[in-house]
Amino acid sequence: MAEAESDTITTQVPSRLDRLPWSRFHWRVVIGLGSVWILDGLEVTMVGNVAARLTEDGSGLDISAGQIGVAGAIYIVGACLGALVFGQLTDRLGRKKLFLWTLVLYLVATVATAFSFSPWYFFLCRFLTGAGIGGEYAAVNSAIDELIPARARGRVDLIINGSYWLGSAAGSALSLVLLSTALLPIDLGWRLAFGFGAVLGICVLFVRRHVPESPRWLFIHGREEEAERIVRGIEEGIEEERGEELPPAEGSLTIRQRKAIPFREIASVAFRKYPRRSILCLALFLGQAFLYNGITFNLGVLLSSFYDVGASLTPLFIIFWALSNFAGPVLLGHFFDSVGRKPMIALAYFGSAAVTLPLAWVFLSQTGGLTAFMILLVITFFLASSGASAAYLTVSEIFPMETRALAIAFFYALGTAAGGIAGPLLFGSLIDTGERMPVAIGFLIAAAVMSLGGVAELVFGVRAEGRELEDLAAPLTAQEDDGPGDGETERGAGETGERA
């Protein structure tokens, strides 16, 4: 290990990782790291489904409907703050430490939630749970992109982010059983619901322990010998699995190692050197956060208020809707690697906005009833889910290695704090009027916000498909003497490090 912070090394670690064929190792990464979105979907949906039960007499928790809304806001605040705090630590201390620490925090907080006895205790548990999930976003997204080969990075990232909706569907299905008073006492079922999330998290923790630290992070921070050992171990495992030697890697990267990089320098490079990319990521996150949080948090109320769907049947509609959200990234994901990021992200944002227009008309005119409304809602979010997943993919690809986790955390926190709070508040107040016209206007506003994301992608989008992360944005340690960094060439910024 290099002791000096200014040692210069030439490494093939990035090209060796990107030329690897798909293997059991990559499946371990996907399962061990990608399952965080299933946990998040399970958490958010479970709380939404048990909310009514918590307010009932005999639930064991004296909490009102208004306080449930406060708990939801506190969860979002925790997620935003957790993303920012743990995102910075992820860039400083490494991916593995943080994706283990944040999962442990989530587990402890979730178990603690099951033992809630008063509103203040419930609020505290929801804040800590959100902090764990927010930290997961930063640590896990950065680690996934640094371990998955470039040619498959787009589709894998989209499917992993889209798996949130598998958790949402599972949460709705579980609530049908756990909230049945014919099967479980009124004060026990909702507690077991939180306990199930903890059990799933423990299983993920065991798998995750075997996922290595990012070799890309290691060689930049003066631990090139450890990076080489990890990559060599991965290669040997794949050669044994396939029964043949891997082809030699092409290309190398020369960097100046630094064990610590000041936060001031990271922020300056990320947001002054790449202002166009920052605008792009902000627009993408705002659009998807506004649309998704606005409708997700209010879909049950909307169905019951305007289509007379009973509380016992609402989870069935949410399961159907959630599965359509997961289908979007699964069926469209490979096009983000073949057709390209820019056209597909623009299609996802503009397409979902376009379908929202007839959705608003069907809702307002009541044409086709609940069936027509649900069909158009499913199509809207089939497209929107790919766009939402692509927002995470974009921000995790187009910033330098040393800022990657922090950039994910920053745009997630800002987008969620703005769109994730404004969306639910707007739709909630419009639904509360009891009139269809204000709600239809809300759909049109959501369409406009999504369209802004599509415009930003067309203007500022980066063609990242199939390219090494170091080509998209060279590490800061390889950018000592570079020039303009934001979209100055056809291949985009970041091609300024020394590559052989």
Image (cartoon, rainbow, N blue to C red):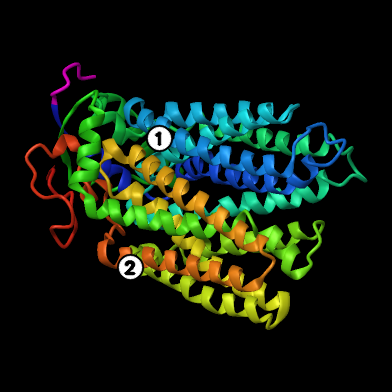
Q: Earlier in the sequence, mark 2 or mark 1?
A: 1
In three-dimensional space, the C-alpha distance between marks 2 and 1, rounded to whole angstroms, equals: 27 Å
Residue at 87 percent across and 35 percent down: it is 58
Dot 2: element: helix
Q: Nearer the viewer, residue 330 or 138?
A: 138
Q: Residue furthest front?
A: 433
* Residue 145 visible (yes or no): yes
Residue at 60 percent across and 54 percent down: it is 165
Q: Which of 158 and 364 is in front in this view?
A: 364
Q: Is residue 152 left or right of residue 112?
A: left
Residue at 80 percent across and 57 percent down: it is 311
Residue 223: x and y in percent read 27, 24
Residue 49: x and y in percent read 73, 49
Residue 453: x and y in percent read 38, 63
Dot 1: element: helix
Mark drawn on residue 455: 2
Q: What residue type is labelled 2?
A: Val
Could you tell me which quadrant the N terminus lies in?
top left
Q: Is residue 4 magenta?
A: yes
Residue at 35 percent across and 42 percent down: it is 146
* Residue 319 visible (yes or no): no
Depicted 242 relative to depicted 488: above or below: above
Depicted 328 relative to depicted 209: above or below: below
Quickly name the residue at label 1: 84
Q: In this view, does 474 lie to the left or right of 480?
A: right
Q: Range of the magenta residues?
A: 1-7
Residue 217: x and y in percent read 30, 33
Mark drawn on residue 127: none
Residue 96's image quarter?
A: top left
Check disc 2: other Cα within 10 Å, few if <14, some if 14-19, many if 20+. some
Q: Which residue lies furthest to the right in this view?
A: 182
